[in-house]
Image (cartoon, grey):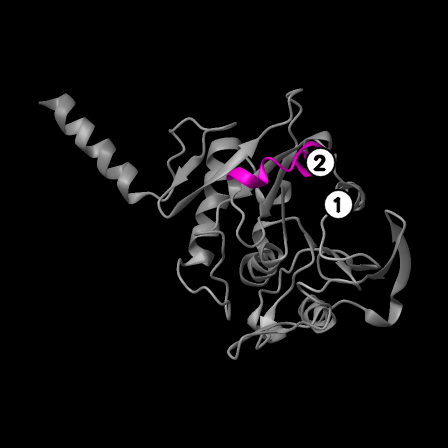
């Protein structure tokens, strides 16, 4: 009788919690949560100092993202776990997106909490990032719950119109590094319309919003070089520099850019 009561109490606790941290996962096995899942690969040498939480691009998935070995291997070489979060049917439901659906703010909060419970990845060990609309998802995460990450490192995607106001974001906007190509036709720097009702945002205007909220000192901006790309580095932000790297390429996320970005953030630590 006592064992039966204990079983049902544990089952109820598991159902009421967004985390299923007791369920083994990793490698080819997804880590399950209430409204979705993520995949994770840890550095093979066992020297694990944090995690890079990555949101995939349109029509991709966590499983497919793990097959992008240059990004995964570069991340683990920095002693970070590579975490691929799974969208719904290859998409994300951030504000003003063309695919409304899951409450992504809550789901991502659950992912970050599960990573904390399961692996000990506290905010000071967690970098968030993504590519294309996955980068957009990372930007909204930084805006809505930036206190849960130590940095934002993204490629080829920003906010969507109507852009949030600076005051819509939390004050704890993390230090930011963003790579974007002048030849990007999928998510141009100036943004573009998708049909009659949806509009990708302007990358410069999006960065200005985060910089304004983080109280960055734009008058003291300097030029630095990451992966051979000249980047606009704005200091004086509440939590660290805001860096925008404009290259002459297209819609892309290269391992060399990721390597330079993680180094600039300070990983490994």
Residue 70: in magenta span: yes
Residue 40, image x and y in percent?
54, 34
Task: Determine which quarter of the picture holds residue 192.
Answer: bottom right
> Which residue is rendered at x = 49% and y = 57% of the image?
92
Residue at (73, 33) in percent of width and height: 78
Q: Examine the structure image and report whether residue 230 is included in the region drawn in magenta.
A: no
Q: Give the left or right position of residue 66, taking residue 24 as reference.
A: right
Label 2: few (<14), some (14–19) or many (≥20) C-alpha neighbours in 10 Å: few
In the displayed orientation, state which residue is furthest to the left: 1
Between the residue at mark 2 and the residue at mark 1, the CA separation in whole angstroms equals 8 Å
Compared across the picture, whether 230 is left or right of 94 comes to right
Residue at disc 2, secondary structure = helix
* Residue 268 % position (x, y): 74, 34
Q: Residue at x 52, y 52 (%)?
A: 59
Q: Residue furthest bottom?
A: 196
- Label annotation for residue 61: none
Task: Please identify the quadrant where the C terminus is shown.
Answer: top right
Residue 263 horizontal/vertical position (percent): 79, 41
Identify which residue, 176 or 2, lies in the foreground: 176
Task: Write down the residue under mark 1.
Answer: 254
For the residues labelled 2 and 1, say whether their Cβ atoms are less than 8 Å apart: yes
Drawn side of residue 206 relative to residue 170, left or right = right
Q: Residues within 10 Å of mark 1 (few under 14, many from 20)?
A: few
Q: Which residue is mark 2?
A: 70
Task: Please name whichever residue, 57 or 50, is drawn nearer the observer in this view of the structure.
Answer: 57
Residue 10 image-quadrant placement: top left
In this rendering, the answer to whether 51 lies above or below 162 is above
Q: Which residues are magenta?
A: 63-75
């Amino acid at each position: 009788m006592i064992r039966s009561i204990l079983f049902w109490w544990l089952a109820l606790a598991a159902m009421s919690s967004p985390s299923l941290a007791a369920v083994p996962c990793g490698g080819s096995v997804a880590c399950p949560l209430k409204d979705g899942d993520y995949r994770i690969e840890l550095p093979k040498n066992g020297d694990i100092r944090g995690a890079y939480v990555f949101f995939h691009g349109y029509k991709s998935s966590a499983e497919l993202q793990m097959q992008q070995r240059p990004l995964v291997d570069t991340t683990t070489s920095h002693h970070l776990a590579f975490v691929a979060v799974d969208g719904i049917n290859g998409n994300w439901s951030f504000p003003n997106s063309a695919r409304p659906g899951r409450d992504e703010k809550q789901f991502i909060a659950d992912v970050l909490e599960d990573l904390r419970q399961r692996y000990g990845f506290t905010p000071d060990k967690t970098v968030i990032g993504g590519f294309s609309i996955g980068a957009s998802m990372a930007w909204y995460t930084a805006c809505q719950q930036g206190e849960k990450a130590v940095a934002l490192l993204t490629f080829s995607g920003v906010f969507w119109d109507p852009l949030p106001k600076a005051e819509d974001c939390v004050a704890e906007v993390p230090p930011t590094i963003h790579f974007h190509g002048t030849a990007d036709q999928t998510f141009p720097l100036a943004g573009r319309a998708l049909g009659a009702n949806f509009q990708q945002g302007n990358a410069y205007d999006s960065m200005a919003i985060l910089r304004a909220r983080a109280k960055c000192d734009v008058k003291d901006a300097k030029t630095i070089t990451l992966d051979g790309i000249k980047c606009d580095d704005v200091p004086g932000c509440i939590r660290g520099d805001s860096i925008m790297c404009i290259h002459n390429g297209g819609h892309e996320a290269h391992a060399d850019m990721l390597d330079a970005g993680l180094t600039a953030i300070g990983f490994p630590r």
